C-alpha cells in the first residue's frame, strides 16, 4: 500500500510523508519498502502541487498507480490537486481518501507495536538514510519534542493492508468446484 500523510511540507514545519509498505502473508511480515519526506521551499506559491509532483515521481519509480491520502484538515482538496497534476503529466492515478478519527498515538501503537514486538516489521536498507529510524527511537506515546510524521504514515499504510482470513482449525478442507457447466 502507498500512503501519503500530507502537511504543508515547509522546511521548519511538520513533515509531509509518503510511504510504501508490503506485507508477506506467508511469513506474516510487513516491509517498509520506501519512504519519502516531502519538503518544498518556504516561498513556494503552490506547495501542495509541488508535493504532488514529487509523489507522482515516487509512484512512477515504483510503478504504482494507487495511493491513499489522509485528508484530515487542510488537505481535503489534495486528491483533486493530485489528479489534476497527474493528468497534466499524462499519468493515471487512483486516489483513496482516508479520514482518521483516532488519536495519532493510538494509530501508531495499534499498527506498529504488534509487528515490532513479534519481529515482523522489516525495512529496506534505504530506510536507514531517512529520518524514520530516529523517529522510532525518539518517539513516546506520551508525546515529546520529537517528530512522528513518518511513524504516522507507516501506521496508515499498515492499516490499509488486507487482513488474511485464516481457518480456526489447523486442518484445511479441500473444496472442489463444479466446472462442468454451459454458457
Image (cartoon, rainbow, N blue to C red):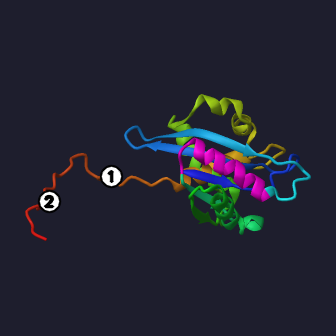
Question: Is mark 1 in CB contact (under 8 Å) with mark 2?
Answer: no
Residue 8 place in picture, x, y as percent: 81, 56
Check residue 56 for magenta coloring: yes
Q: Residue at x 65, y 55 (%)?
A: 89
> Is residue 53 at least partly visible in the picture?
yes
Q: Nearer the viewer, mark 1 or mark 2?
A: 2
Tell me: residue 44, above or below residue 99: above
Left or right position of 104 against 157 = right
**Disc 2, SS:** loop
Please rate how many residues cluster around mark 1, counting C-alpha atoms within 10 Å: few if below 14, some from 14 to 19, many from 20.
Answer: few
Specify the segment rendered in magenta.
48-64
**Disc 1, SS:** loop
Prevailing SS of the magenta stretch? helix
Circle number at residue 177: 2
Q: Residue at x 84, y 44 (%)?
A: 145
Q: Earlier in the sequence, mark 1 or mark 2?
A: 1
Residue 157 place in picture, x, y as percent: 58, 51
Task: Count every numbered label the image shows and give the total.
Answer: 2
Check residue 72 for magenta coloring: no
Residue 113 place in picture, x, y as percent: 59, 44
Circle number at residue 103: none
Relative depth, front residue between 130 and 78: 78
Dot 1 corresponds to which residue?
Answer: 166
> Is residue 152 at least partly visible in the picture?
no
Q: Residue at x 71, y 51 (%)?
A: 53
Amino acid at each position: 500500500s502507498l500512503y501519503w500523510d500530507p502537511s504543508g511540507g515547509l522546511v521548519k514545519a511538520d513533515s509531509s510523508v509518503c510511504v510504501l509498505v508490503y506485507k508477506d502473508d506467508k511469513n506474516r511480515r510487513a516491509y517498509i519498502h520506501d519512504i519519502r519526506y516531502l519538503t518544498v521551499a518556504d516561498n513556494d506559491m503552490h506547495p501542495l502541487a509541488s508535493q504532488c509532483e514529487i509523489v507522482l515521481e515516487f509512484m512512477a519509480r515504483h510503478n504504482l498507480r494507487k495511493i491513499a491520502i489522509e485528508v484530515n484538515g487542510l488537505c481535503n482538496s489534495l486528491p483533486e490537486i493530485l489528479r489534476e497534476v497527474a493528468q497534466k503529466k499524462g499519468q493515471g492515478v487512483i486516489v483513496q481518501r482516508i479520514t482518521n478519527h483516532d488519536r495519532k498515538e493510538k494509530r501508531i501503537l495499534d499498527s506498529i507495536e504488534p509487528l515490532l514486538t513479534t519481529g515482523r516489521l522489516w525495512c529496506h536498507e534505504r530506510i536507514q538514510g531517512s529520518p524514520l529510524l530516529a523517529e522510532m527511537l525518539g518517539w513516546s506515546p506520551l508525546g515529546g519534542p520529537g517528530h512522528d510524521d513518518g511513524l504516522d504514515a507507516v501506521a496508515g499504510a499498515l492499516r490499509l493492508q488486507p487482513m488474511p482470513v485464516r481457518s480456526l482449525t489447523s486442518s484445511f478442507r479441500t473444496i472442489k468446484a463444479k466446472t462442468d457447466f454451459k454458457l
